[in-house]
Image: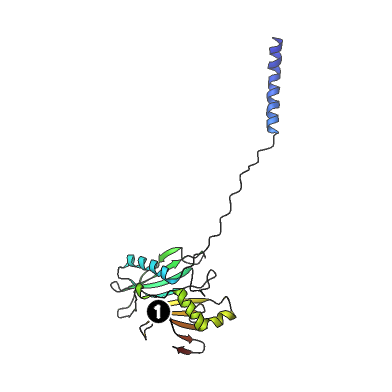
Amino acid sequence: MKAIRFWLSVLPFISILVLLSCSSQPANVSTSKPAESEKKLEPALSTALPCLERMAGQAMRWEMDALPYSMESEANEEAIGQDGRSTVWHARFASASASQSKTFNCSGSRLKDSPPLGITGEHHVPYRPGLTIMTFSRERVAVDSDEAASLATKHGAEEYIKKDPRQPMVFQLGIDPKSNKLIWLAVVGKSQENSKVVIIVDATRPKFLGQFKRNTEKAEGK
């Protein structure tokens, strides 16, 4: 009995010692690695024709008879455009049956102020009755923007690129109302208004057609 009473009397102290020894052990340190920070998402560059195909598909969902009448690249910090590629392309489509036009964007940009990734459309707007909009079919465009860039480099753009390796260029596609030809305008600059030279390339076959210098108001062609 004395032995039983002894163990009953010391048992609480043993329990306390066990608890103290457990609490004195160092806290378990997590060995799991911290979550990796998100990888920087890279922009997607494209030449004109793949974007035009995708925008044309969206335009036909808007109006079945929608056809493009202009297309333009955007020069930004992701792509200066010298190789005819851009992260953002804009194209305007017109529907004769609805007498409306609508702009579509093809974006692979990660910039905050750029259109969202993919193909997006803006609000359609009516155009005045009698206004001539010179639309063209996708099939007429045989020269992609990278080929237009190569021709433009050989016929006037190279001298400006040598002076400034970061010289931006934009590319505009449409029909010349004077000749009724489908042409590329390779603009050395971010817009025609501040361009150093605008080089004209046939969009139906790889051919240099001429150049126009806005600041000197001179034009020359072949």
Q: What residue is pinned by disc 1?
A: 205
Q: Which residue occupies the foreground of this view, 149 or 98?
A: 149
Q: Quadrant of the C terminus?
A: bottom left
Residue in the picture at 69% in, 26% down: 16
Residue in the picture at 70% in, 17% down: 9
Q: From the viewer's perspective, is residue 86 above or below residue 38?
A: below
- Image side of residue 72 versus residue 3, left or right: left
- Image side of residue 164 versus residue 172, left or right: right
Q: How is the image coloured?
A: rainbow
Q: Position of residue 177 (x, y in %)?
A: 36, 84
Secondary structure under badge 1?
loop
Q: Which residue occupies the foreground of this view, 2 or 33?
A: 33
Q: Quadrant of the N terminus?
A: top right
Q: Position of residue 95 (x, y in %)?
A: 31, 72
Quarter of the image for residue 165 reads: bottom right
Q: From the viewer's perspective, is residue 68 above or below residue 44?
A: below
Q: Amino acid at mark 1?
A: Arg
Disc 1 crowd rating (10 Å Cα; few below 14, some 14-19, many 20+) is some
Q: Position of residue 150 (x, y in %)?
A: 49, 77
